[in-house]
Amino acid sequence: MFLGMRTGCCWLVLLLGLAAAGCNRGASGTVQRSAPRVTVEHPVVRQLVDEDEYTGWLRPSQEVEVRSRVRGHIQKILFRDGDMVKQGQLLFELDPRPFQAAIDQSKAQAKVADAQRVAAEKDVARQRELLVHKAVAQSELEKAEADALSFASRVTVAMQEVEQHKLELEYSRVTAPINGRIGRAQLTEGNLVNAGGTDPLLTTIVLIDPIFVYFNVDERALQRYQNARQREPGSQAASLREQKIPFRFGVDTDEGFPRSGVLDFAENKVSSSTGTIELRGEVKNLDARLIPGSRVRLRIPVSDKYEAVVVPDTAVLADQDRRYLLVLGKGNEVLRRDISPGKLLDDGMRVLLPAPGEEKAAGKKDRIKNWGKEWLITVGLQRARVNYPVEPLDSNGQPIAAPAAAQ
Protein backbone atom coordinates (compact mmCIF):
# COMPACT_ATOMS: atom_id res chain seq x y z
CA MET A 1 0.00 0.00 0.00
CA PHE A 2 2.85 2.34 0.88
CA LEU A 3 4.46 1.57 -2.51
CA GLY A 4 1.24 2.56 -4.38
CA MET A 5 0.98 5.89 -2.57
CA ARG A 6 4.61 6.64 -3.34
CA THR A 7 4.06 5.96 -7.09
CA GLY A 8 1.00 8.25 -7.17
CA CYS A 9 2.92 11.08 -5.55
CA CYS A 10 5.64 10.79 -8.18
CA TRP A 11 3.12 11.18 -10.99
CA LEU A 12 1.59 14.22 -9.26
CA VAL A 13 4.98 15.90 -8.92
CA LEU A 14 5.72 15.22 -12.61
CA LEU A 15 2.46 16.80 -13.78
CA LEU A 16 2.96 19.90 -11.64
CA GLY A 17 6.44 20.27 -13.09
CA LEU A 18 5.16 20.13 -16.68
CA ALA A 19 2.47 22.71 -15.94
CA ALA A 20 5.03 25.04 -14.40
CA ALA A 21 7.27 24.68 -17.44
CA GLY A 22 4.49 26.08 -19.72
CA CYS A 23 3.99 29.19 -17.62
CA ASN A 24 6.19 32.06 -16.50
CA ARG A 25 5.69 33.95 -13.29
CA GLY A 26 6.21 37.68 -13.22
CA ALA A 27 7.71 39.75 -10.44
CA SER A 28 4.29 39.95 -8.77
CA GLY A 29 4.02 36.18 -8.78
CA THR A 30 1.15 36.01 -11.38
CA VAL A 31 1.29 33.48 -14.21
CA GLN A 32 2.10 35.01 -17.66
CA ARG A 33 1.29 32.95 -20.77
CA SER A 34 3.35 33.46 -23.94
CA ALA A 35 1.58 35.39 -26.77
CA PRO A 36 0.29 33.17 -29.63
CA ARG A 37 2.19 33.32 -32.88
CA VAL A 38 0.37 34.57 -36.01
CA THR A 39 1.37 35.39 -39.58
CA VAL A 40 0.74 38.94 -40.75
CA GLU A 41 1.08 40.88 -44.01
CA HIS A 42 0.17 44.25 -45.44
CA PRO A 43 -2.92 44.66 -47.65
CA VAL A 44 -2.08 44.99 -51.36
CA VAL A 45 -2.92 47.93 -53.64
CA ARG A 46 -3.78 46.87 -57.21
CA GLN A 47 -4.88 48.38 -60.49
CA LEU A 48 -8.30 46.86 -61.26
CA VAL A 49 -10.98 47.09 -63.93
CA ASP A 50 -14.61 46.14 -63.27
CA GLU A 51 -15.84 43.49 -65.70
CA ASP A 52 -19.03 41.61 -66.52
CA GLU A 53 -18.69 37.87 -67.02
CA TYR A 54 -20.64 35.76 -69.53
CA THR A 55 -20.66 32.29 -71.03
CA GLY A 56 -20.48 31.91 -74.80
CA TRP A 57 -19.50 29.51 -77.56
CA LEU A 58 -17.23 29.48 -80.60
CA ARG A 59 -18.40 29.41 -84.20
CA PRO A 60 -16.43 29.48 -87.47
CA SER A 61 -16.35 32.77 -89.33
CA GLN A 62 -17.31 30.86 -92.51
CA GLU A 63 -18.78 27.40 -93.04
CA VAL A 64 -19.41 25.72 -96.40
CA GLU A 65 -21.11 22.43 -97.26
CA VAL A 66 -19.28 20.89 -100.20
CA ARG A 67 -21.61 19.20 -102.71
CA SER A 68 -21.20 18.04 -106.31
CA ARG A 69 -22.85 20.01 -109.12
CA VAL A 70 -22.91 17.04 -111.50
CA ARG A 71 -23.80 13.36 -111.40
CA GLY A 72 -20.98 10.84 -111.46
CA HIS A 73 -18.91 8.23 -109.64
CA ILE A 74 -16.17 9.35 -107.24
CA GLN A 75 -12.84 8.31 -108.72
CA LYS A 76 -10.38 9.95 -106.30
CA ILE A 77 -10.42 11.66 -102.91
CA LEU A 78 -7.44 14.00 -102.69
CA PHE A 79 -7.40 15.06 -99.02
CA ARG A 80 -7.20 13.55 -95.56
CA ASP A 81 -9.92 14.08 -92.99
CA GLY A 82 -9.19 17.13 -90.84
CA ASP A 83 -6.61 18.71 -93.18
CA MET A 84 -6.20 22.45 -93.58
CA VAL A 85 -7.09 23.19 -97.22
CA LYS A 86 -6.63 26.20 -99.49
CA GLN A 87 -9.23 27.82 -101.70
CA GLY A 88 -9.21 26.10 -105.13
CA GLN A 89 -7.52 22.93 -103.85
CA LEU A 90 -8.79 19.76 -105.56
CA LEU A 91 -10.81 17.62 -103.13
CA PHE A 92 -12.84 15.07 -105.17
CA GLU A 93 -12.43 13.86 -108.72
CA LEU A 94 -15.37 12.22 -110.49
CA ASP A 95 -14.96 9.86 -113.44
CA PRO A 96 -14.39 12.31 -116.34
CA ARG A 97 -15.08 9.91 -119.22
CA PRO A 98 -18.87 10.46 -119.49
CA PHE A 99 -18.36 14.21 -119.56
CA GLN A 100 -15.62 13.98 -122.22
CA ALA A 101 -17.84 11.70 -124.32
CA ALA A 102 -20.67 14.24 -124.11
CA ILE A 103 -18.28 16.96 -125.31
CA ASP A 104 -17.15 14.87 -128.30
CA GLN A 105 -20.74 14.02 -129.22
CA SER A 106 -21.79 17.68 -129.13
CA LYS A 107 -18.81 18.63 -131.29
CA ALA A 108 -19.80 16.00 -133.85
CA GLN A 109 -23.37 17.29 -133.93
CA ALA A 110 -22.01 20.80 -134.41
CA LYS A 111 -19.98 19.63 -137.43
CA VAL A 112 -23.04 17.93 -138.97
CA ALA A 113 -25.14 21.05 -138.45
CA ASP A 114 -22.40 23.24 -139.90
CA ALA A 115 -22.16 21.06 -143.06
CA GLN A 116 -25.92 21.29 -143.49
CA ARG A 117 -25.71 25.06 -143.04
CA VAL A 118 -23.07 25.35 -145.80
CA ALA A 119 -25.20 23.27 -148.17
CA ALA A 120 -28.28 25.32 -147.35
CA GLU A 121 -26.47 28.59 -148.03
CA LYS A 122 -25.34 27.30 -151.45
CA ASP A 123 -28.94 26.31 -152.20
CA VAL A 124 -30.05 29.83 -151.31
CA ALA A 125 -27.54 31.27 -153.79
CA ARG A 126 -28.84 29.02 -156.59
CA GLN A 127 -32.47 29.86 -155.81
CA ARG A 128 -31.69 33.57 -156.11
CA GLU A 129 -30.15 33.13 -159.57
CA LEU A 130 -33.12 31.07 -160.73
CA LEU A 131 -35.51 33.65 -159.37
CA VAL A 132 -33.81 36.34 -161.45
CA HIS A 133 -34.58 34.29 -164.56
CA LYS A 134 -38.03 33.52 -163.16
CA ALA A 135 -37.27 29.81 -163.17
CA VAL A 136 -38.52 29.30 -159.58
CA ALA A 137 -41.17 30.85 -157.44
CA GLN A 138 -40.46 33.32 -154.63
CA SER A 139 -41.64 30.75 -152.09
CA GLU A 140 -38.84 28.35 -153.07
CA LEU A 141 -36.23 30.99 -152.26
CA GLU A 142 -37.84 31.80 -148.95
CA LYS A 143 -37.90 28.10 -148.01
CA ALA A 144 -34.16 27.76 -148.85
CA GLU A 145 -33.34 30.83 -146.72
CA ALA A 146 -35.32 29.42 -143.78
CA ASP A 147 -33.45 26.11 -144.01
CA ALA A 148 -30.10 27.95 -143.98
CA LEU A 149 -31.08 29.91 -140.86
CA SER A 150 -32.29 26.70 -139.16
CA PHE A 151 -28.99 24.89 -139.76
CA ALA A 152 -27.05 27.95 -138.53
CA SER A 153 -29.10 27.88 -135.31
CA ARG A 154 -28.36 24.17 -134.89
CA VAL A 155 -24.65 24.94 -135.10
CA THR A 156 -25.02 27.56 -132.37
CA VAL A 157 -26.99 25.18 -130.14
CA ALA A 158 -24.46 22.41 -130.63
CA MET A 159 -21.57 24.71 -129.71
CA GLN A 160 -23.43 25.84 -126.58
CA GLU A 161 -23.87 22.20 -125.61
CA VAL A 162 -20.13 21.73 -126.04
CA GLU A 163 -19.49 24.61 -123.61
CA GLN A 164 -22.07 23.18 -121.17
CA HIS A 165 -20.39 19.77 -121.20
CA LYS A 166 -16.99 21.39 -120.75
CA LEU A 167 -18.39 23.13 -117.68
CA GLU A 168 -19.70 19.81 -116.37
CA LEU A 169 -16.27 18.29 -116.93
CA GLU A 170 -14.81 21.12 -114.87
CA TYR A 171 -17.44 20.53 -112.14
CA SER A 172 -16.37 16.88 -112.00
CA ARG A 173 -13.28 18.18 -110.22
CA VAL A 174 -14.67 19.37 -106.87
CA THR A 175 -12.44 22.06 -105.33
CA ALA A 176 -12.40 23.89 -101.98
CA PRO A 177 -14.46 27.11 -102.15
CA ILE A 178 -12.70 28.68 -99.10
CA ASN A 179 -9.62 28.28 -96.92
CA GLY A 180 -10.13 26.35 -93.70
CA ARG A 181 -10.22 23.01 -91.94
CA ILE A 182 -12.01 20.23 -93.81
CA GLY A 183 -14.17 17.58 -92.15
CA ARG A 184 -14.32 13.90 -92.98
CA ALA A 185 -15.39 12.64 -96.41
CA GLN A 186 -19.03 11.58 -96.22
CA LEU A 187 -18.69 9.36 -99.32
CA THR A 188 -15.81 7.11 -100.31
CA GLU A 189 -14.32 6.32 -103.70
CA GLY A 190 -16.66 4.41 -106.03
CA ASN A 191 -19.88 5.95 -104.71
CA LEU A 192 -22.34 7.57 -107.09
CA VAL A 193 -22.90 11.29 -106.56
CA ASN A 194 -26.38 12.34 -107.61
CA ALA A 195 -26.57 16.09 -108.21
CA GLY A 196 -30.03 17.55 -107.87
CA GLY A 197 -32.70 17.57 -105.20
CA THR A 198 -31.15 14.64 -103.35
CA ASP A 199 -27.49 15.57 -103.85
CA PRO A 200 -25.51 14.15 -100.92
CA LEU A 201 -23.11 16.10 -98.74
CA LEU A 202 -19.50 15.35 -99.62
CA THR A 203 -17.81 17.17 -96.73
CA THR A 204 -17.73 20.51 -94.89
CA ILE A 205 -15.08 23.23 -94.58
CA VAL A 206 -14.91 25.79 -91.77
CA LEU A 207 -12.80 28.94 -91.65
CA ILE A 208 -11.33 29.14 -88.13
CA ASP A 209 -9.02 32.16 -88.43
CA PRO A 210 -10.53 34.45 -87.47
CA ILE A 211 -13.09 32.65 -85.30
CA PHE A 212 -16.23 34.14 -83.73
CA VAL A 213 -17.41 34.15 -80.10
CA TYR A 214 -21.18 34.38 -79.61
CA PHE A 215 -22.94 35.17 -76.31
CA ASN A 216 -26.11 36.81 -75.00
CA VAL A 217 -26.43 39.91 -72.82
CA ASP A 218 -29.42 41.87 -71.59
CA GLU A 219 -30.22 45.04 -73.49
CA ARG A 220 -29.24 47.32 -70.59
CA ALA A 221 -25.75 45.83 -70.51
CA LEU A 222 -25.27 46.49 -74.23
CA GLN A 223 -26.40 50.10 -73.81
CA ARG A 224 -23.97 50.50 -70.90
CA TYR A 225 -21.05 49.21 -72.98
CA GLN A 226 -21.87 51.52 -75.86
CA ASN A 227 -22.48 54.60 -73.68
CA ALA A 228 -19.12 54.07 -71.99
CA ARG A 229 -17.41 54.46 -75.38
CA GLN A 230 -19.57 57.15 -76.96
CA ARG A 231 -17.25 59.67 -78.54
CA GLU A 232 -19.12 62.91 -77.80
CA PRO A 233 -22.46 63.67 -76.09
CA GLY A 234 -25.18 64.04 -78.70
CA SER A 235 -23.07 62.57 -81.52
CA GLN A 236 -24.44 59.85 -83.76
CA ALA A 237 -24.03 56.44 -82.15
CA ALA A 238 -21.25 54.42 -83.72
CA SER A 239 -21.74 50.79 -84.61
CA LEU A 240 -20.38 48.08 -82.36
CA ARG A 241 -17.65 47.35 -84.92
CA GLU A 242 -16.53 50.98 -84.93
CA GLN A 243 -16.41 51.20 -81.14
CA LYS A 244 -13.93 48.29 -80.90
CA ILE A 245 -14.99 47.16 -77.43
CA PRO A 246 -12.37 44.65 -76.17
CA PHE A 247 -13.02 41.52 -74.12
CA ARG A 248 -11.02 38.70 -72.52
CA PHE A 249 -11.95 35.05 -72.66
CA GLY A 250 -10.76 31.52 -71.99
CA VAL A 251 -11.81 27.97 -72.84
CA ASP A 252 -12.45 25.32 -70.19
CA THR A 253 -8.81 24.21 -70.17
CA ASP A 254 -7.44 27.75 -69.70
CA GLU A 255 -6.62 29.25 -66.34
CA GLY A 256 -8.34 32.60 -66.09
CA PHE A 257 -8.94 34.65 -69.24
CA PRO A 258 -5.67 34.64 -71.23
CA ARG A 259 -7.13 35.33 -74.70
CA SER A 260 -8.57 38.53 -76.14
CA GLY A 261 -10.86 39.73 -78.90
CA VAL A 262 -13.01 42.67 -80.06
CA LEU A 263 -16.80 42.91 -80.28
CA ASP A 264 -17.88 43.46 -83.89
CA PHE A 265 -21.60 42.70 -84.19
CA ALA A 266 -24.90 42.84 -82.31
CA GLU A 267 -28.19 41.38 -83.53
CA ASN A 268 -30.72 43.87 -84.85
CA LYS A 269 -33.38 43.08 -82.26
CA VAL A 270 -33.85 41.93 -78.67
CA SER A 271 -35.43 38.53 -78.10
CA SER A 272 -38.93 39.09 -76.70
CA SER A 273 -38.87 35.71 -74.92
CA THR A 274 -35.56 36.16 -73.03
CA GLY A 275 -35.01 39.93 -73.04
CA THR A 276 -31.46 39.41 -74.31
CA ILE A 277 -29.57 40.25 -77.47
CA GLU A 278 -26.87 38.17 -79.15
CA LEU A 279 -23.40 39.70 -79.49
CA ARG A 280 -20.44 38.50 -81.51
CA GLY A 281 -16.73 39.01 -81.04
CA GLU A 282 -13.91 38.38 -83.50
CA VAL A 283 -10.84 36.48 -82.29
CA LYS A 284 -7.53 35.65 -83.96
CA ASN A 285 -6.85 31.90 -84.13
CA LEU A 286 -3.46 31.65 -85.80
CA ASP A 287 -2.49 28.42 -84.05
CA ALA A 288 -5.89 26.82 -84.87
CA ARG A 289 -6.30 25.64 -81.26
CA LEU A 290 -9.74 27.17 -80.84
CA ILE A 291 -12.32 24.67 -82.07
CA PRO A 292 -15.82 25.70 -83.26
CA GLY A 293 -18.54 24.61 -80.85
CA SER A 294 -16.36 24.94 -77.73
CA ARG A 295 -17.78 26.71 -74.68
CA VAL A 296 -15.92 29.80 -73.46
CA ARG A 297 -15.95 32.14 -70.47
CA LEU A 298 -15.53 35.83 -71.26
CA ARG A 299 -15.34 39.17 -69.51
CA ILE A 300 -16.13 42.65 -70.82
CA PRO A 301 -14.67 45.76 -69.07
CA VAL A 302 -17.26 48.19 -67.70
CA SER A 303 -14.95 50.72 -66.02
CA ASP A 304 -11.61 52.44 -66.37
CA LYS A 305 -8.59 51.30 -64.35
CA TYR A 306 -8.64 52.28 -60.68
CA GLU A 307 -6.65 51.56 -57.52
CA ALA A 308 -8.16 49.26 -54.90
CA VAL A 309 -7.08 47.62 -51.66
CA VAL A 310 -7.23 43.81 -51.70
CA VAL A 311 -6.71 41.27 -48.91
CA PRO A 312 -6.76 37.46 -48.79
CA ASP A 313 -10.34 36.29 -48.63
CA THR A 314 -9.34 33.73 -45.99
CA ALA A 315 -8.53 36.63 -43.64
CA VAL A 316 -12.09 38.01 -43.78
CA LEU A 317 -14.15 36.93 -40.75
CA ALA A 318 -17.92 37.09 -40.24
CA ASP A 319 -20.03 38.20 -37.31
CA GLN A 320 -23.65 37.63 -38.33
CA ASP A 321 -24.18 40.13 -41.17
CA ARG A 322 -20.92 42.00 -40.59
CA ARG A 323 -17.48 41.31 -42.02
CA TYR A 324 -14.25 42.28 -40.30
CA LEU A 325 -10.47 41.84 -40.25
CA LEU A 326 -8.04 41.37 -37.39
CA VAL A 327 -5.18 43.88 -37.46
CA LEU A 328 -2.28 44.77 -35.15
CA GLY A 329 -2.45 47.78 -32.88
CA LYS A 330 0.04 49.29 -30.43
CA GLY A 331 2.15 46.67 -28.71
CA ASN A 332 0.95 43.97 -31.16
CA GLU A 333 -2.50 44.11 -29.61
CA VAL A 334 -5.22 42.57 -31.80
CA LEU A 335 -7.85 45.02 -33.06
CA ARG A 336 -11.04 44.38 -34.98
CA ARG A 337 -11.61 46.39 -38.15
CA ASP A 338 -15.10 46.22 -39.72
CA ILE A 339 -15.03 46.32 -43.53
CA SER A 340 -17.26 46.44 -46.60
CA PRO A 341 -16.13 43.50 -48.76
CA GLY A 342 -16.18 43.84 -52.54
CA LYS A 343 -15.79 41.31 -55.32
CA LEU A 344 -13.66 38.18 -55.05
CA LEU A 345 -10.77 38.09 -57.55
CA ASP A 346 -9.56 35.02 -59.42
CA ASP A 347 -6.52 34.55 -57.16
CA GLY A 348 -8.57 34.44 -53.95
CA MET A 349 -8.07 38.11 -53.01
CA ARG A 350 -11.03 40.18 -51.82
CA VAL A 351 -11.53 43.86 -52.71
CA LEU A 352 -12.15 46.21 -49.78
CA LEU A 353 -14.79 48.81 -50.52
CA PRO A 354 -14.77 52.14 -48.64
CA ALA A 355 -16.72 51.95 -45.39
CA PRO A 356 -19.52 54.54 -45.02
CA GLY A 357 -17.84 57.93 -44.68
CA GLU A 358 -14.29 56.49 -44.78
CA GLU A 359 -13.25 57.80 -48.19
CA LYS A 360 -15.06 61.11 -47.64
CA ALA A 361 -13.25 61.72 -44.37
CA ALA A 362 -9.73 60.68 -45.40
CA GLY A 363 -9.78 61.01 -49.16
CA LYS A 364 -9.23 58.17 -51.60
CA LYS A 365 -5.44 58.39 -51.70
CA ASP A 366 -5.09 58.70 -47.93
CA ARG A 367 -7.47 55.79 -47.39
CA ILE A 368 -5.37 53.54 -49.66
CA LYS A 369 -2.16 54.79 -48.01
CA ASN A 370 -3.49 54.09 -44.52
CA TRP A 371 -4.55 50.58 -45.43
CA GLY A 372 -1.10 49.93 -46.87
CA LYS A 373 0.43 50.51 -43.41
CA GLU A 374 -1.81 48.02 -41.60
CA TRP A 375 -0.54 44.65 -40.43
CA LEU A 376 -3.26 42.16 -41.24
CA ILE A 377 -3.46 38.75 -39.53
CA THR A 378 -3.77 36.09 -42.24
CA VAL A 379 -2.70 32.85 -40.50
CA GLY A 380 -3.49 31.86 -36.92
CA LEU A 381 -6.80 33.72 -36.77
CA GLN A 382 -8.21 31.09 -34.41
CA ARG A 383 -5.46 31.85 -31.88
CA ALA A 384 -5.84 35.64 -31.95
CA ARG A 385 -8.18 37.36 -29.49
CA VAL A 386 -9.33 40.97 -29.73
CA ASN A 387 -7.57 43.32 -27.25
CA TYR A 388 -4.91 40.70 -26.47
CA PRO A 389 -1.32 40.76 -27.80
CA VAL A 390 0.13 38.28 -30.30
CA GLU A 391 3.61 37.49 -31.58
CA PRO A 392 3.55 38.51 -35.28
CA LEU A 393 5.67 36.75 -37.89
CA ASP A 394 6.08 37.49 -41.57
CA SER A 395 5.43 34.94 -44.34
CA ASN A 396 8.98 33.59 -43.87
CA GLY A 397 8.48 33.01 -40.14
CA GLN A 398 10.62 35.97 -39.05
CA PRO A 399 9.43 38.29 -36.23
CA ILE A 400 8.32 41.82 -37.14
CA ALA A 401 8.48 45.02 -35.13
CA ALA A 402 5.36 46.08 -33.28
CA PRO A 403 3.48 49.08 -34.75
CA ALA A 404 4.16 52.34 -32.93
CA ALA A 405 0.44 53.11 -32.77
CA ALA A 406 -2.84 51.78 -34.14
CA GLN A 407 -3.55 52.89 -37.71
Image (cartoon, rainbow, N blue to C red):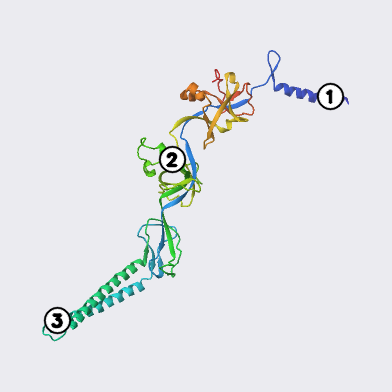
Residue 394 visible in rendering: no
Quarter location, residue 190: bottom left
The residue nearer to you, when weighing 271 against 34, is 271
The N terminus, quarter of image: top right
Q: Residue furthest top?
A: 28
Q: Which residue shows up at 59% across the image and 21% down it?
A: 332
Estimate the x, y position of residue 206 in percent, counting from the top left: 42, 55
Q: Residue furthest front?
A: 138
Return the residue at label 1.
Answer: 6
Return the residue at label 3.
Answer: 128
Q: Which residue shows up at 46% across the image and 40% down it?
A: 221
User: Badge 2: few (under 14), some or many (20 or more) residues near its Cα, within 10 Å?
Assistant: few
Classify 14 as above or below 172.
above
The residue nearer to you, when weighing 386 against 24, is 386
CB-based contact (under 8 Å), mark 1 and mark 2: no
Secondary structure at badge 2 equals helix
The residue nearer to you, when weighing 75 against 68, is 68
Residue type at mark 3 is Arg
Residue type at mark 1 is Arg
The C terminus, quarter of image: top right
Label 3 – label 1 distance at C-alpha: 159 Å
Label 1 – label 2 distance at C-alpha: 88 Å
Estimate the x, y position of residue 388 in percent, counting from the top left: 63, 21
Classify 108 as above or below 58.
below
Classify 168 as above or below 14.
below
Return the residue at label 2.
Answer: 223
Residue 314 visible in rendering: yes
Q: Earlier in the sequence, mark 3 or mark 1?
A: 1
Label 3 – label 2 distance at C-alpha: 84 Å
